[in-house]
Image: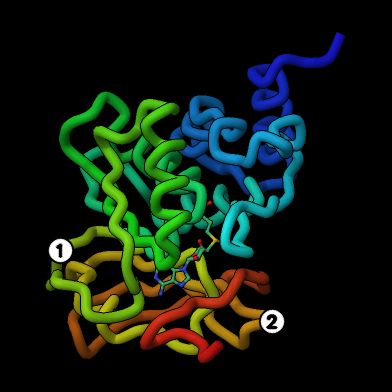
Amino acid sequence: MGRSFEEERQRLVEELRREGYVKSDRVAKALLKVPREEFVLPKYRRYAYLDMPLPILSGQTISAPHMCAIMCEELELREGLKVLEVGTGSGYHAALCAEIVAPRGGGGYVCSIEYFRELASFSKRNLRRAGYDDRVSVINGDGSSLLPFRDEFDRILVTAAAPKIPPKLMECLKPGGIMVIPIGTSLLQTLKVVIKENIEKYIVRERGSCCFVKLRGLEGFAD
Ligand code: SAM
């Protein structure tokens, strides 16, 4: 008999810990709790616990679990934080963040912006089915610019490749806040961890190469 999704989830988290992607109990717990099978297309459910990106709708992908783990660790998430995600996709990564910042509901929350309308609807359905729609709100729009926020978020997670740090996102981040963002070309990027001191001053650390789908919209890559 095949393994249950729960057993597969357990095996994946052990593997991610062994490989050094999962470092904290908080991230391990979130990966053990969020059912990735509810965020992939029905035809890919049996591949939900392979450590690889999978196609979703609109030519986009759900990120590989190890990349979600790296980004969650770099964001230093903890209960009570307000998180902005640019690139909801399936809603999986937003659910992982919500599991850490609002494990029992209340306190923290995740606001996630998705460019494609059909993905915004897809992610909302997935989040509802998996029980995260009370802690994650999804907006359909361009998350690279024109956001009506200032010093609002403790953490920003960008899950699409950007040519440079979008200035509007720096404005949305609170002083002392952390943003994780892949910066580079549309084919290859470096994962950057940006710590904002104030609007003019920020520290940037590099965390290795990565390969994300491209950021669209005003601050993204032209089609
Ligand atoms: N976080 C997602 C998940 O857990 O499934 C994976 C996201 S996928 C790698 C990147 C997403 O960014 C795509 O769904 C894409 O449509 C979205 N995206 C690209 N440009 C965007 C923009 N300017 N604003 C909002 N979302 C954008």
Ranked by sequence position, the earlier of labels 1 and 2 is 1
How far across and how far down the image is residue 55, in percent? Answer: 68, 54
Camera-nearest residue between 59 and 174: 59
- The residue at 59%/43% (across/down) is 22
From the top left corner, tell me how far across and down residue 18 is, in percent.
73, 39
Q: Mark 1 points at which residue?
A: 152
Give x and y (percent) for residue 216: 46, 79
Question: Between 56 and 31, which is closer to the camera in this rendering?
Answer: 56
Q: How crowded is mark 1: few (under 14 residues within 10 Å), some or many (20 or more)?
A: some
Q: Which amino acid does label 2 sit on?
A: Leu
Quadrant where the C terminus sits is bottom right
In the drawing, what numbered circle is on residue 25? none
Q: Quadrant of residue 1?
A: top right
Q: Give the amino acid at mark 1.
A: Glu
Report which residue position mark 2 lands on. Answer: 187
Q: Distance between the residues labelled 1 and 2?
A: 31 Å
| 65 lies left or right of 146 | right
Q: What element carries label 2?
A: loop
